[in-house]
Amino acid sequence: MEVHIMDVGKADAILIRCGSRSALLDAGHGVSAESVIDYLYRHDVRKLDYLIMSHPDRDHIGGMPQILRELPVSFFVQGRISDNLLPDSLEYKDLQAALKETEVPQIILRPGESVSIGVAQLTALGPLKEYKNTNDSSLVLRLSCLDFTALFCGDMEKGAEQDLLTSQQDIHADLLKVGHHGSKTSSMLEFLCEVAPKYAAISVGPDRNELPREEVLARLEQLGAELYQTDTDGSIVFLYDGKDVVIKTDK
């Protein structure tokens, strides 16, 4: 199994492969669409079993319309999100148009429900309720493949993190895709302690918010997590052969 955290700046694009099956979780900004497609081609991905939207912010869906129009996609997957939170952005409108043009079947994944990627399972843990912002409404996914686990948090912030803790679901993971690009509004210590990751990856690039924040990095270091960042490491690939994990980086 492979987890590729692509270098797309302060945005998310994550390729998950297991055997001949593949899923793309988010697709970066629109300007990243060509580089994401090129990355998929270079890794022999010519079709996607799942194109998954964590939430409808520009830096997560911008590349999706072009991907839908250029690659065969079996299913488009998203979590539940309130109608009043759906954006009026050009990116979201283009995504809806592309879904209509391509007639890709859509799945709304609710907590407890899963999709399979080969022998791996992607299970939704959240969002657990209707929130007032798109970040907390992020689709939270836990990947499991034999004894390897990974947690993908989208841009989930502290309120939704606390709800996950209260739900007493199993959120432990070997790999944590750090929420909200390392923003101080996410990754509270209690949440990180429960996840207890061996590896932590942050998808980040030059930005006025100066992410990732030092306090988030300090918390991860306090837990002893092996930390990777796309701005310094480039694309990060976690390879799992059923026994060992090997990490490769572009830089």
Image (cartoon, helix red, strand yellow):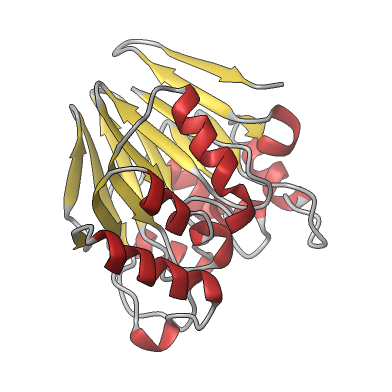
- Tell me the residue at 48%/53% (across/down): 191
Spot occupied by residue 235 in the image (x, y as percentages of width and height) = 61, 30
- Tell me the residue at 49%/62% (across/down): 156
Q: How many marks?
A: 0
- Tell me the residue at 45%/62% (across/down): 161
Spot occupied by residue 141 in the image (x, y as percentages of width and height) = 34, 50
Give above or below for 23 relative to 114.
Answer: above
- Looking at the rendered image, the quarter that the C terminus falls into is top right
Spot occupied by residue 233 in the image (x, y as percentages of width and height) = 70, 28
- Tell me the residue at 40%/46% (across/down): 70
Spot occupied by residue 80 in the image (x, y as percentages of width and height) = 29, 71
Direction bottom: furthest residue = 84
Give above or below for 158 relative to 245.
Answer: below
- Looking at the rendered image, the quarter that the N terminus falls into is top left
Q: Is residue 246 left or right of residue 109?
A: right
Give above or below for 81 relative to 24.
Answer: below
Which residue is more in the foreground, 185 or 123?
123
Which residue is more in the foreground, 189 or 123?
123
Picture quadrant of residue 40: top left
State whether residue 97 appears in this view: yes
State whether residue 79 appears in this view: no
Which residue is more in the foreground, 238 or 142?
238
Q: Is residue 187 left or right of residue 51?
A: right
